[in-house]
Amino acid sequence: MNYKKTTLKNGLRIMTVPMKGTQTATVVVMVDVGSRLEKENQAGLSHFVEHMFFKGTKKRPTTQIISEELDSFGGEFNASTSKDKTLYYAKVDSNHICQAFDIISDMFLNSKIEQAEINRERGTITQEINMYLDLPGKTVGDEFEKLLYKNSSLGREIIGYKKTVSRFKRKDFIKYIRENYNASNTVICVAGKFDEKKIIADAKKYFGKFSKGKTTKISKVSEKQNKPEVRIKFKKTDQTHFVIGNRAYHRDHKDRYALALLATILGGNMSSRLFIEVRERRGLAYSVHSGVDAYQDCGYIATQAGVEHDKLEQAINVILKEYKKIATEKVSQRELKKAKDFLKGRGVMGFEASDEVAMFYVSQETDREKVLNLKDVFAKINAVTAEDILRVAKDVFQNKKLNCAIVGPHKNSKKIQKILNL
């Protein structure tokens, strides 16, 4: 599957990825800014901006008009805000891709951002904050990043605070958009079945006069840590949720594929070591999963699980035992091959859908020094050896890089601290 990259005079990048054998097409418009760019008094503004882009333009004055037009041809559409990106997308029957592109572009470039709509949307976002507070499985991940990145905007929750959300005025939105939403920070990707010349012509028509602006510069986080750390959020829950893991690599690190395979072997699927040890053999958790999260300048590998309150220490001990094992003993060729085949299989399945392909290429453009296709990625995965896994595990699973966040009816961290200091 080949892609084409077109860069407009103002610096805006357009990725086009034709796909054979599909009747769908997806358009993604991604801006390379997110919540970590915000100052403390702006907490939640990136996410609030995302919401406001659905509230109406001059051409399409209301949320209902936007939604009805996309619904009229069965389109899937949404947006999301992360700590370093905000994206808007629509997946449609390929016959309607130009119409969908027009709608998404209109929202992105011409939203009215009216004060009355801002006032109404505060209530929606406040309820979204309340919803997340009632989801300890989500909250614990936020607590883990607060622990890793304390005193940094990267450690703050994307959605912000009720106090900041309640204070935003229209001028705050306009200033933030003017400073950060520009051609230098924006990438468009269209994948699926479409007329490439028409899409590129439309992109030039919609975005040709888009302000060039400046590329976003982040304040790098401090990764200084010399001993294990624990963070507990007391909450009366039916289950204790925890995340335990170690500082690792930034998203374009040379060992990112070895780290991905390491996480897969540990807890990436239902035949992984931790799934078998924690769930199947001991019945400690229903859900246990290991994964990697990475940003431009930092990252981590971690395991999350939910357990009975009195099984917390046992579950942590089991996980730490597996961390130690994989950092001292080479994985077998069979286990390594299984992990490689798993990642490649997921990649192939994802590439059957135009939305997955669009997300892949827009992320490659914003996250990597060099855009890779799926064949390139598979070659990188295949090149990882058992020795690489052991080397990376030894580097990552050091006691001084270890962190644990807990949400549940717990107050005393001394027992956990003692376990982590093993």
Image: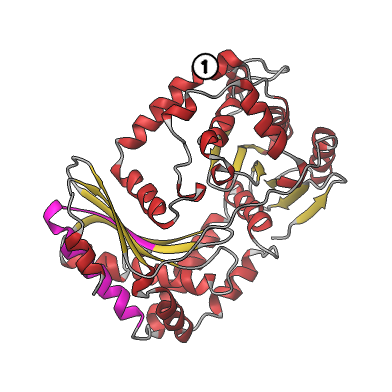
Comparing 306 with 179, the one in front is 179
At x 70% / y 47%, what residue is drawn? 189
- Callout 1 amino acid: Asn
At x 69% / y 64%, what residue is drawn? 369
Comparing 195 with 163, the one in front is 163
Name the residue at the right extreme. Answer: 9
Secondary structure beneath disc 1? helix
What residue range appears in magenta? 302-327
User: Residue 164: x, y in percent?
Assistant: 48, 29
Q: Residues within 10 Å of mark 1 (few under 14, many from 20)?
A: some
User: Residue 409: x, y in percent?
Assistant: 17, 45
User: Residue 328: x, y in percent?
Assistant: 34, 85
In the picture shown, does residue 175 fall above or below 362?
Answer: above
Q: Per the image, is 314 magenta?
A: yes
Q: Is residue 54 left or right of residue 266?
A: right
In which quadrant will I find the C terminus? bottom left
Q: Which residue is mark 1?
A: 119
Q: Per the image, is 303 magenta?
A: yes
In which quadrant will I find the N terminus? bottom right
At x 72% / y 17%, what residue is drawn? 58
